[in-house]
Structure formats: C-alpha cells, structure tokens
Image (tube, rainbow, N blue to C red):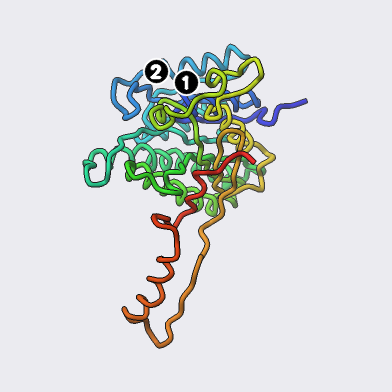
Amino acid sequence: MSLPLEGLSAIVTGAGRGLGRAEALELARLGAAVVVNDYGQPGRDGSGAASAAPAEEVAAEIRVAGGRAVAHLGDVSDFETARALVDLAVSEFGKLDVLVNNAGILRDRMVFSMTEDEWDSVIRVHLKGHFNTTHFAAVHWRGRSKAGETGVYGRIVNTSSEAFLAGSAGQPNYAAAKGGIVGLTTSSALALARYGVTVNAICPRARTRMTEDVFAAIPAIKGGAEPSAEGELDPLSPDHVAPLVGYLASPAAAGVNGQLLVVHGGMVAVVDRPKVSAKFDTAKEAFTYEELDSLLTPHYASRPAGETFAAAEVLGLKKG
C-alpha cells in the first residue's frame, strides 16, 4: 500500500523546531521527500547567530527513519534566499509539490510602545516570508503548466493565527501579519487553482518555543508532548497540528482551497468567511450623522462589551 505523499517533495520553513519540525516529520512519515528550512537563530525574536544545526538535526532524523531529506539554512524573508530554497527542492528531488510556510518570529509590544523595527521585522519574516516562497513556488508550478505538463500538483499550507481572528493586545505586528497571510492565502488560492494548486491556511495552537510563556499556565497531560502510558498527549502538542498539514498536502484534499482552519488538541474547526451581521439602509438619499447615530449606537450597545468584528469565540473552541 502506497503512502499518501509517496513520490512528492515538500518544503517546510522554520522546520528546525516546534511546529515546523513536527510538520516536516509528518510529511516524511506520509512519504514525502522534505527540504527542512530553518535560519537556526536561538531567540524567538530572531536574535542570535544563524545555525544550520536545527535543520540538519531534523533532516537527519528523517533520514534515520528511512525517509529522504535535505537541510537548508536561510532566512525566507530574503527574496533571493526563497528563490534558492525552491531551486534546492527542484534540484534535489526533481520538482516541488508541497510548500508549508511556518517560519516566524515574535517581538511583542503594545501598539503605543512598539518600535518601527519591531513592527517591520515581524511583518517581514511572517508576511513577506510567506509571499517570497509562495511566489517562487507559484512560478515553478505555472512554468510547468505553461510548458504543457499535465497533472501539475501543488499544495501550499500557510500559518496564520487566532491572534488575527480575535485580536491580541500585545501583538499588533503579529496579528497584522497573520491577517495578511489569510489575505495572501485566499488571493493565491484563486490565482493558482487553474494550475492544479491549492492554498490553505491553518491557525494552530501549540506549545512551542514561540508560545512557551503564553501557555505556561496550561499544564500538559501526563508529562508533556510525549505519549504517556495511557497514550495521552499534551493538548497543546504540535503533534496535534501536523496531521492536518499532512492531509492538506495530500491528494485527498484536492477539493479544499482558500480555506482557514483552526487546529489544536484533537480538534479542527473550519472558519467561514466574514459574514454581515446587520444591515441598515438610509431613509433618504444619503446618511446623515444623526441617522447613523440612531441606527448604529443602539446596535453596538446591545452587543457584549469588547466584542470585536471577528469570531472571538474561536479562541474558546474545545474538542467536541
């Protein structure tokens, strides 16, 4: 019996640790040859010297398990580095089939305290990094299609966040980048469908180096991310997220395109596009201030205090 991703090749960015590592291992387990990308900086804020060690260790782990993998040291927010990353997948494995964009950093600060560099760096790594790799992967797939190749196969899985869905007061840069990634996802999904490519995004919740302080107060089940004697996992283990990435990368997900899915702790939630919750029409040719006040003020007064336009309840989703 063949594996779901047998014969396919994949890139996973930020795959030296945490979510990216779990995703790379899962794609390899499902049969894909994997390019493990990571810049290897020790600080979650992107600080420290770059190191090939994290990516090399994950690639070696895949090879020891019988899979095919190569490591790539590089910052995907650099346009030419992203080009070289896609070229590496093609030269090593003959083609690229799957791109998982996961690389990111955090530089948290309230909006009134955030510096220009803290804003720019997070937008650059998350949003520009997603664009860079998506661009060169799309060029690869479109070029093959234009050359007359039939049955071109392409999958992109992007990483957004619940910080975009319901806000995150101390992360205006991160929330904005993750919202931008959803826009990039839906736009790319429409543009690339004709070439046999699907583009989807996930909002994962997982205990990693990036989120260690956020989830510090949430205990693991029976000893953390490794299975206990009873086979239980930490509900925030990245191992809960990786199977969804494997599914979205597979032929089985051919009909899934332009979608956003929240995933954590044995739960997957499909998020709808924003919907109109109320509509008001002017009684005359154009609205006046007074008319808007009479319509909108009572409407918002009837809603829970602090409720945002987004589905805030997404943050409280539980299994079942």
Residue 135, x across and y down, in percent: 45, 43
Residue at the location (40% across, 29% down)? 210
Q: Which mark is residue 71?
A: 1
Callout 2: 10 Å neighbours few (<14), some, many (20+)?
A: some
Q: Secondary structure at mark 2?
A: loop
74 or 263, which is in the foreground? 263
Question: What's the amino acid at mark 2?
Answer: Ala
Residue 285, x across and y down, in percent: 39, 87
Residue 33 located left or right of residue 136? right
In the picture, residue 250 is in which quadrant? top right
Q: Residue furthest top?
A: 64
Question: Counting residues from the N terminus, which is met first, the one under dot 2 or under dot 1?
Answer: 2
Query: Can residue 92 be seen from the camera position used here?
Result: no
In the picture, residue 77 is in which quadrant? top left
Is the C terminus in the top left, top right, bottom left or bottom right quadrant?
Answer: top right
Is the N terminus in the top left, top right, bottom left or bottom right quadrant?
Answer: top right
**C-alpha separation, residue under disc 2 versus residue under disc 1:** 8 Å
Residue 227 located left or right of residue 3? left
Callout 1: 10 Å neighbours few (<14), some, many (20+)?
A: many
Does the CB distance between marks 2 and 1 fall below 8 Å?
yes
Residue that label 2 marks: 52
The relative height of residue 279 versus residue 65 in the rendered view (above or below) is below
Residue at the location (54% across, 21% down)? 225
84 or 220, which is in the foreground? 220
Residue 41, x across and y down, in percent: 34, 23
